[in-house]
Amino acid sequence: MHRRVFISGLAVGSIAVPRITPAQSARKVYRIGILGLRATSELVGSEPRSPTVRALLKGLGELGYVYGDHFVTEPRGADGRPERFPGLAAELVRLQVDVILAAGPALPALKQATSTISVIMTASPDAVRHGFVESLGRPGGNFTGFSVQSVETVGKRLELLKELVPGAATVAVLRDRFGILDWQAAEAAARERGWQLLSLEIRDAGEIESAFRAATGARAGAILVFAPGLLFPHARQVAAQATKSRLPAMYEQRPYVEAGGLVSYGADLNDIWRRAAVFVDKILKGAKPVDLPVEQPTKFELVINLKTAKALGLTIPQSILSRVDDVVQ
């Protein structure tokens, strides 16, 4: 009788002790590569300074992923120097990360570096025209994600700028070599409406100040700034030069306005990076980019900096104020 009790108790005890299986002890921690224009120090860790990377981590958290437990990031930042992208892309490929996220200027380097690692585009200006995918519905390779179709909104930004600063004065267009498609779209829109444009193409950040001098020398009445490439990391400098030159400036992305720029109209990048977490989740679970259609932004925002408008002595028309999504004081 005592023996039966002992055996029964042993059985119960064996059920109560948790078992560690090989699968549990060897659970993979995924490595998510991030390639961006900012300094690496702004992209790293579970609480990065970069708003877009924070948005990505928020999106992954909403899907149940815990940083350090289920995944870590492997960020590589070009520190405002696009020429570093090929080397940084090759470095991520050598690390054999599970997936890579990157925006427009970094994508050509990734296209050259890998045809096997999944790449999620977090804002390609036009993924088809740039050759990253065959079509939005059928990507056809290792790229998928978001195509912001920024070229299609160039005309809208010009119209808003002309509404803000009416008249026949020339509009200067500040860009680098990554903005060639945007420039062509601006030319077409201006030609259709009879507006005069002045192209200001820069090759490095050291030419920003001289570009604004050229704009004022040509008596431009306003300036349209394209975001890609080397300009974005210098948003504060660009915004300060625009104000100093007394040039109302229209930007493609909100960070310029937060850095002191006058007005922006474009896709909400934080929303795109948060939604990119869904692509990451699907790929980590075995999906292939070729089977994941490219998406387009669902949220566009018009943002105005009233402090900058005041510094320029500019009165914002009510027709624009009524459409503003957010105001920076």
Image (tube, grey):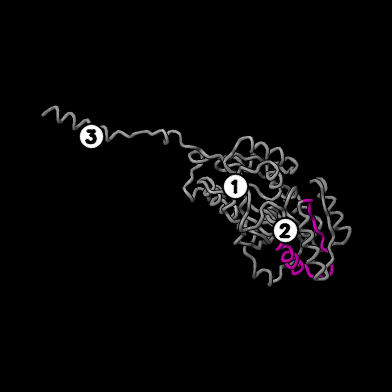
Measuring 66% from the left and 42% from the top, which residue is drawn there?
A: 114
Q: Residue at x 84, y 69 (%)?
A: 168
The percent coordinates of residue 320 (x first, y second) are 68, 69
Q: Is the residue marked by circle 1 packed among few (<14), some (14-19), or many (20+) residues within 10 Å?
A: many
Residue 309: x, y in percent?
A: 72, 62
Looking at the image, the residue that sits furthest to the top is: 3
**Mark 2 or 3, nearer chain start:** 3
Amino acid type of the residue that numbered disc 3 sits on in the rendered structure: Val
Q: Is residue 8 left or right of residue 82?
A: left
Q: Magenta part of the protein: which range?
A: 150-177
Q: Residue at x 14, y 27 (%)?
A: 3
Mark 3 and mark 1: span between their CA atoms?
49 Å
Mark 1 or 2, nearer chain start? 1
> Which amino acid is tagged 2?
Tyr
Upstream in the sequence, badge 3 or badge 1?
Answer: 3
Q: Is residue 206 magenta?
A: no
Seen from the viewer's position, the closer of residues 47 and 295 is 295
In 3D space, how far apart are the residues under numbered discs 1 and 2 (Cα atoms)? 21 Å
Estimate the x, y position of residue 290 in percent, counting from the top left: 59, 51
Which residue position holds label 2? 251
Residue at horizontal 38 percent and vertical 34 percent from the top:
21
- Pick out the residue farthest to the left: 1
Figure quadrant of the C terminus: bottom right
> In the drawing, does residue 205 fall left or right of residue 99?
right
Mark 3 highlights which residue? Answer: 12
Q: Which residue is mark 1?
A: 53
Q: Quarter of the image holding residue 244?
A: bottom right
